[in-house]
């Protein structure tokens, strides 16, 4: 095991922070580190929270992290897309100051720099590092303003969609996708008028989408006041207990593993083929594609041919 992996296992927070930076910058040191920690990541529970900008996700995550920490859990918190133009670029760690930094909570935001594939890899890596560091619960905040909310599904055991009063029509009009990804819904800012109406709207839209979704829990919270947090925690902890849910979770983990395998394979295959072809052939293929003398698929097949022949 690498020294850094050992430090992370022993609970060294600075080592964990450094490791996340390595993953974020796609350092050549990252794969070995992740491989060392991978066996220790199975038992961590990953909860994704997504929702439109400003609905109160960070405030909610902060409350949840504190409450779980009070119960003795070690909680990792990851905020994705803090540089989103929608959110004004505020980092979770900036906006929410934990007055009394709890040693059981580790907060980190991941810069996205607009690269979706990169975000996904960095996210998967950062979750694995936190899990490997012994954070039994990892909370991930993503702004549901694009594809990142779908990305979170490929990492989380459970996805929470956060809404606020007065968004029902909006959800119906153009955010149907967000309804399908929620295992659990939160109507935050329940101190504002219209929260019960929003709950009813979500309920009826879920029912229209799929009859089985009629049972999906919807809880109301006032994150700023800590109201409804216990009920939300109960719903979160109650999730995945029934035999059907357990089966779904196992299936989801297999799907996620399948996706991780494909990603790793695609990346390795490109590296191998590129190395096998040599720089001249690679550059020539690029030139010919750009000049429209060949098409990408044909060029790719030509580069693959020697390899498939060998096999
Ligand atoms: N009235 C009210 N305001 C709230 C509540 N929860 C959060 N807020 C406020 O809503 C604003 C946005 O809260 P955040 O927690 O930063 O929301 P967010 O969803 O993380 O925002 P982005 O990360 O920018 O998408 C802040 O001013 C919070 O104080 C609530 O329950 N009621
Ligand atoms: Mg936020």
Image (cartoon, grey):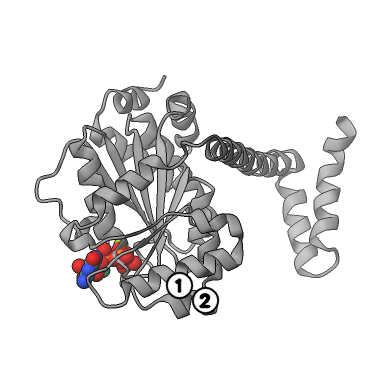
Total count of labels: 2
The quarter of the image that holds ligand 1 is bottom left
Q: Position of residue 215 (x, y in %)?
A: 50, 54
Q: Give the distance between the C-alpha atoms of the residues marked 1 and 2, in whole angstroms.
A: 9 Å
285 with respect to 241 (left or right)? right
Q: Determine which of the numbered discs, if any, sits on residue 201 in the image.
A: 1
Q: Position of residue 186 (x, y in %)?
A: 36, 60
Q: Nearer the viewer, residue 253 or 95?
A: 253
Q: Position of residue 19 (x, y in %)?
A: 35, 37
Q: Determine which of the numbered discs, if any, sits on residue 245 in the image.
A: none
Residue at image location 53% in from the left, 40% down from the top: 245
Tag nearer the camera, 1 or 2? 1
Quadrant where the image shows the C terminus:
top right
Is residue 69 depicted above or below 183 in this figure? above
Q: What secondary structure is found at the residue carrying circle 2?
A: helix
Q: What secondary structure is found at the residue carrying circle 1?
A: helix
Is residue 200 depicted above or below 254 in this figure? below
Q: Quadrant of residue 270?
A: top right
Task: Give the residue at mark 2.
Answer: 172
Q: Circles 1 and 2: CB distance less than 8 Å?
A: yes
């Amino acid at each position: 095991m690498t020294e850094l992996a050992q430090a992370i296992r022993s609970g060294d927070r600075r080592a964990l922070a450094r490791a996340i930076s390595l993953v974020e910058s796609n350092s050549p040191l990252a794969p070995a580190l992740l491989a060392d920690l991978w066996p220790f990541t199975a038992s961590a529970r990953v909860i994704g929270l997504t929702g439109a900008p400003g609905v109160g996700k960070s405030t909610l995550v902060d409350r949840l992290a504190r409450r779980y920490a009070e119960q003795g859990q070690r909680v990792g918190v990851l905020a994705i897309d803090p540089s989103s133009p929608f959110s004004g670029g505020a980092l979770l760690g900036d906006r929410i100051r934990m007055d009394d930094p709890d040693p059981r909570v580790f907060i980190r935001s991941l810069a996205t720099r607009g690269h979706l594939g990169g975000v996904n890899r960095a996210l998967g890596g950062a979750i694995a590092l936190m899990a490997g560091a012994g954070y039994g619960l990892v909370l991930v905040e993503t702004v549901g303003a694009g594809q990142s909310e779908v990305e979170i599904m490929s990492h989380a055991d459970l996805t929470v969609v956060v809404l606020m009063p007065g968004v029902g029509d909006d959800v119906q009009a153009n955010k149907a996708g967000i309804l399908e990804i929620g295992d659990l819904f939160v109507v935050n800012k329940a101190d504002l008028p219209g929260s019960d109406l929003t709950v009813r709207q979500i309920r009826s839209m879920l029912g229209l989408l799929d009859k089985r979704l009629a049972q999906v829990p919807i809880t109301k919270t006032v994150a700023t006041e800590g109201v409804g947090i216990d009920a939300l925690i109960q719903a979160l902890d109650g999730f995945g207990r029934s035999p059907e849910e357990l089966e779904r979770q196992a299936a989801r983990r297999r799907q996620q593993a399948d996706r991780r395998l494909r990603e790793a394979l695609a990346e390795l295959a490109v590296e191998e083929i590129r190395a096998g072809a040599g720089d001249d052939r690679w550059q020539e293929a690029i030139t010919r594609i750009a000049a429209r003398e060949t098409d990408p698929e044909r060029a790719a097949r030509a580069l693959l041919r020697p390899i498939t022949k060998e096999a």
